[in-house]
Image: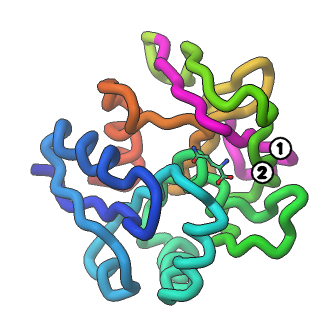
């Protein structure tokens, strides 16, 4: 057992992330209120609908609480798809959409076009020796990357996996494949 990881459980596929953590022998804790963050060093924000996640996180006081913990450097965060959108500083075309703003990127929602609802593609992730099977569902891409943002994987020259300090964000859904390497990478990032 390597410590406890929080999974934001307001909306979206948080159960699949819990299952990925279980496969790694890590205890997952559902986070729905600011007090659930106590003692946590790592939080996963699932895919789903970023407008709903953002709205509920604001309503429940989690937006402010998570932002504070990330600013302090005491919480690592991994956002997948809608979760990644919530982390971004800017959401192109949706200036009013609630977001955390801790990742210095502009994110474009549904960037591969609405007609391309979903697809799968093997990705080369920096530091991984074998390709990672990426599942993309109405996926965003990261644009206008700030100086501190490192690109870990690209697809057709669009960044699809980025990292800034202890903040990790993917356009795709690692929780929907049996491959746990990216979750393991995040645990290491969080110092777990
Ligand atoms: N699979 C997903 O998480 C889709 C994200 C969705 N396109 C959004 O903007 O919230």
Depth check: give the residue in front, 45 or 110: 110
Mark closer to the chain start, 1 or 2: 2
Whether residue 171 appears in this view of the structure is yes
> At 66% from the left edge and 34% from the top edge, which residue is drawn?
160
Depth check: give the residue in front, 117 or 5: 117
- Residue 153 lies in quadrant: top right
- Residue 39 lies in quadrant: bottom left
- As helix, strand or loop, the secondary structure at mark 2 comes to strand
> At 81% from the left edge and 62% from the top edge, which residue is drawn?
90
Query: Which residue has dot 1 on it?
Result: 143
In the picture provided, is 108 more to the left or to the right than 72? right
Q: Where residue 102 sits: x, y (%)?
A: 65, 66
Query: Which residue has dot 2 on it?
Result: 107
Above or below 142: residue 32: below
Is there a contact, CB below 8 Å, between mark 1 and mark 2? yes
Neighbours of disc 2 within 10 Å: few (<14), some (14-19), many (20+):
many
Q: Which residues are magenta?
A: 131-151
In the picture provided, is 190 more to the left or to the right than 59? left
């Amino acid at each position: 057992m390597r410590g406890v990881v929080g999974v934001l459980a307001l909306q979206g596929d948080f159960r699949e992330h819990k299952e990925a953590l279980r496969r790694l022998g890590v205890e997952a804790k559902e986070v729905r209120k600011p007090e659930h963050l106590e003692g946590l060093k790592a939080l996963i924000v699932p895919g789903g609908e970023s407008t709903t996640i953002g709205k509920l996180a604001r309503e429940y006081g989690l937006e402010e609480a998570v932002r504070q913990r990330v600013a302090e450097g005491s919480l690592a965060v991994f956002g997948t798809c809608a979760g990644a959108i919530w982390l971004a500083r800017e959401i192109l075309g949706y200036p009013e959409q609630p977001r955390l703003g801790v990742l210095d990127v502009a994110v474009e929602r549904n960037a591969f076009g609405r007609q391309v609802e979903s697809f799968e593609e093997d990705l080369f992730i920096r530091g991984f020796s074998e390709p990672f099977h990426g599942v993309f569902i109405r996926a965003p891409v990261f644009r206008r990357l700030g100086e501190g943002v490192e690109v870990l994987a690209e697809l057709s020259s669009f960044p699809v996996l980025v990292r800034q300090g202890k903040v990790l964000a993917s356009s795709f859904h690692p929780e929907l494949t049996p491959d746990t390497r990216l979750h393991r990478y995040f645990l290491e990032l969080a110092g777990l």
